């Protein structure tokens, strides 16, 4: 696409993109980190990877080992 455009058209596209980026609302990294931590901590009690799977609901638990002996 850029091959079909003149240098002036390419510079105009870049300028338009930069104008969009300048007007984008920004938040501090610290605020974003705090939101992410709160989100993860709220979901942690229901996360099976963190709390584990109850033995009665675990299809891989039991005396069926992971090895097949023939």
Image (cartoon, rainbow, N blue to C red):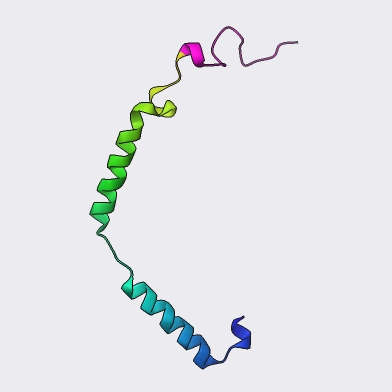
Q: Is residue 63 left or right of residue 26?
A: right
Instruction: Give whichever of 15, 65 is nearer the camera.
Output: 15
Quadrant placement of the C terminus:
top right
Residue 28 is left or right of residue 22, and the answer is: left
* Magenta stretch: includes residue 33: no
Quarter of the picture containing the N terminus is: bottom right
Question: Where residue 62 sits: x, y (%)?
Answer: 55, 9
Give above or below for 50 relative to 40: above
Identify which residue is drawn at 30% across, 66% down.
25
Seen at 63% across and 87% down, the residue is 4
Which residues fall within the magenta stretch? 55-70
Most extreme residue toward the right is: 70
Residue visible at 69% across and 14% down? Answer: 68
Check residue 66 for magenta coloring: yes
* Predominant SS of the magenta segment: loop
Q: Is residue 60 left or right of residue 20?
A: right
Question: Where residue 54 sits in the image (x, y, percent)?
Answer: 45, 15
Classify residue 20 by image quadrant: bottom left
Q: Would you place residue 48 above or below residue 42 in this image?
A: above
Q: Is residue 66 above or below residue 27?
A: above
Q: Residue placed at 43% from the left, 28% from the top?
A: 49
Indicate left or right for 30 with 12 as reference. Answer: left
Q: Is residue 51 above or below residue 11?
A: above
Q: Could you say which quadrant of the image residue 65 lies in?
A: top right
The number of numbered badges drawn on the structure is: 0
Residue 43: x percent and y percent?
35, 34
């Amino acid at each position: 696409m850029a091959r079909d455009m003149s240098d002036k058209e390419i510079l105009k596209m870049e300028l338009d993109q930069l104008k969009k980026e300048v007007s984008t609302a920004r938040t501090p990294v610290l605020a974003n980190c705090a939101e992410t931590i709160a989100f993860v901590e709220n979901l942690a009690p229901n996360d099976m990877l963190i709390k584990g799977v109850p033995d009665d609901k675990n299809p891989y638990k039991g005396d069926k080992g992971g090895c097949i002996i023939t």
